[in-house]
Image (tube, rainbow, N blue to C red):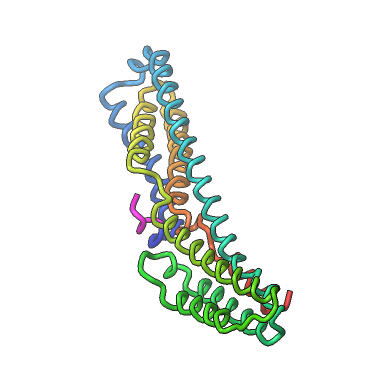
């Protein structure tokens, strides 16, 4: 599924097209089927049709279930990555106290700038291109630590650990970039979802019911339920984009905590 559909098209518009379009398509198929095959004829085969629809329905449920579980795990992994990145630099705040209050304030200032730039340019930081402003923030923080002249064992331990901490922050950012590009369903899985959805919706109109109003209400309801599942899969496909996505809330919380002295 293309990224633009989730990133550039409003979720309400995608939902409207999918949730309204699939039931409408199902009802259109129903009209075509019953124009050539009257319900009196189809009703004789309801038992066989029911077995086939049940079989396809089970296959559909399995495919959708696997998709939802996979996408949810991807969302949780992305959420954990963002949270880990947001707090990755915070140990430097307490550790820098071994160099005095002035150094600690400088470290806090650079960390806040780094976190705030991620919040302000969240979408830019997810792209494949280098994000120069964030890299410059990390370079300034590295320069602050590198300029320190440790005299005690505690200070030397802080400088050594701080360099590793800064490196881990960059590692988390690159991991988030990778997840933003790769955490999505494979084309094979999409083929399975679309084929199972299409087969189920195509078979439903072959039930023969005497009352056409009841039949179409049931078809519309079934189509709406299936369409809702498809809409959820579409919106969950990219964990960093769309209405159901990871946001920079963890980074924002870190900024608020550090600026307020908590």
In this picture, is 192 found above or below 236? above
Residue 4 located within the stretch drawn in magenta: yes
> Residue 44: which quarter of the image?
top left
Q: Is residue 249 left or right of residue 122?
A: right
> Residue 146: which quarter of the image?
bottom right
Q: Is residue 216 left or right of residue 191?
A: right
Q: Estimate the x, y position of residue 150 in percent, counting from the top left.
A: 64, 80
Quadrant in which the C terminus appears: bottom right
- What type of secondary structure mainly makes up the magenta span? helix
In this picture, is 92 found above or below 208? below
Residue placed most toward the observer, 145 or 48: 145
Q: Estimate the x, y position of residue 4 in percent, counting from the top left.
A: 35, 59
Q: Residue at x 55, y 60 (%)?
A: 82
Residue 174 appears in the rendering = yes
Q: Residue at x 46, y 30 (%)?
A: 62
Q: Estimate the x, y position of residue 15 in percent, counting from the top left.
A: 44, 51
Q: Residue at x 35, y 68 (%)?
A: 129
Extreme residue toward the right, this view: 262
Residue 260 appears in the rendering = no
Residue 31 located within the stretch drawn in magenta: no
Q: From which residue to which does the magenta span run?
A: 1-6
Q: Is residue 116 left or right of residue 200?
A: right
Residue placed most toward the observer, 1 or 227: 1
């Amino acid at each position: 599924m293309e990224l633009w559909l989730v990133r550039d098209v409003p979720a309400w518009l995608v939902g409207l097209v999918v949730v309204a379009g699939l039931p409408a398509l199902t009802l259109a198929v129903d009209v075509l089927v019953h124009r050539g095959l009257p319900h009196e004829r189809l009703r004789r085969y309801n038992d066989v049709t029911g077995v086939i629809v049940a079989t396809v329905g089970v296959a559909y449920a399995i495919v959708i279930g696997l998709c939802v579980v996979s996408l949810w795990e991807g969302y949780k992994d992305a959420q954990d990555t963002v949270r880990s990145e947001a707090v990755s630099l915070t140990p430097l705040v307490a550790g820098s106290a071994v160099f005095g209050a002035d150094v600690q304030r400088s470290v806090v200032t650079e960390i806040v700038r780094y976190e705030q730039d991620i919040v302000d340019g969240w979408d830019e930081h997810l792209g494949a291109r280098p994000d120069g402003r964030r890299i410059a923030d990390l370079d300034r923080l590295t320069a602050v630590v590198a300029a320190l002249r440790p005299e005690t064992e505690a200070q030397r331990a802080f400088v050594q650990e701080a360099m590793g901490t800064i490196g881990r922050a960059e590692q988390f950012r690159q991991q988030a970039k990778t997840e933003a590009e790769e955490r999505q369903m494979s084309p094979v899985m999409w083929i399975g979802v679309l084929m199972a959805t299409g087969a189920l919706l195509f078979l439903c109109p072959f039930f023969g019911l005497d009352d056409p109003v009841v039949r179409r209400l049931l078809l519309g309801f079934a189509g709406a339920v299936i369409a809702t599942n498809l809409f959820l899969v579409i919106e969950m496909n990219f964990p960093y984009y769309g209405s159901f996505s990871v946001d920079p809330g963890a980074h924002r919380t870190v900024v608020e905590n550090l600026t307020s002295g908590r």
